[in-house]
Image (cartoon, rainbow, N blue to C red):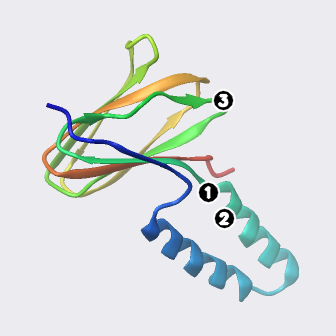
Amino acid sequence: MLAAVTLSIGITRSAADDLTDDLARCASVAPDLARLACFDALAGEAVVEVYAGKGGGMTGLFTVEMPRLLHFESSDVIMIATLLRADDTVAQNLHLGGRGTGRYLIAEPGDYRLQVNASGAWRVWLTAPAE
């Protein structure tokens, strides 16, 4: 039985709190060019999509039109994820042993979904890669 998966476009509450802190940090940077570079770096990290669940689950299809960083986070002892192409062929196997986060660059455009098997809660999200 698969766990319910939540999709939200935008940013999560914790990401919003982090963004508020980052914006305040950037606002305090001087000189002007350094402050602008700080804000530009934040814009490049904008969260595109967020998926979350507990135990096993699968995201819906999502489209990658340009390179995207897939971030994956586990709140328990193990998380195994399989990045699948639209035709269900394996693009990449991912795993975490213990709590924490990992990243994988999806460089090839296409439609993907992620199959997750975890011992606890998990979350995955896509961002634009840092330049």
Callout 2 crowding tier (Cα within 10 Å): few <14, some 14–19, many ≥20: some
Using the numbered discs, state the Cα–Cα distance from disc 3 to disc 2 in whole angstroms: 20 Å
* Farthest residue, direction right: 32
Q: Position of residue 119 (x, y in %)?
A: 13, 46
Q: Of the numbered discs in the image, which one, if any, rests on residue 68?
A: none
Q: Which circle's residue, 3 or 2, is located before the other in the chain?
A: 2
Q: Amino acid at mark 3?
A: Glu
Callout 1 crowding tier (Cα within 10 Å): few <14, some 14–19, many ≥20: some
Residue position marked by numbered label 3 in the rendering: 65
What's the residue at 62%, 47% (across, down)? 128
Where 59 sits versus 51, above or below?
Answer: above
> Residue 79: which quarter of the image?
top left
Q: Position of residue 27 (x, y in %)?
A: 73, 84
Q: Is residue 126 left or right of residue 29?
A: left
Answer whether residue 72 is visible to the viewer in this image: no
Q: Which circle's residue, 1 or 3, is located before the other in the chain?
A: 1
> Residue 43: which quarter of the image?
bottom right
Answer whether residue 112 is visible to the viewer in this image: yes
Q: Amino acid at mark 1?
A: Glu
Where 110 sits versus 22, above or below?
Answer: above
Q: Which of pointers 3 and 2 indicates the residue nearer the eye?
A: 3
Residue position marked by numbered label 2 in the rendering: 42
Residue position marked by numbered label 1 in the rendering: 45
Where 35 sits versus 113, above or below?
Answer: below
User: For numbered disc 3, what is the local secondary structure?
Assistant: loop
Where 70 sits versus 131, above or below?
Answer: above
Q: Is residue 107 left or right of residue 91?
A: right
User: For numbered disc 1, what is the local secondary structure?
Assistant: loop
Q: Is residue 93 left or right of residue 56?
A: right
> Residue 40: which quarter of the image?
bottom right
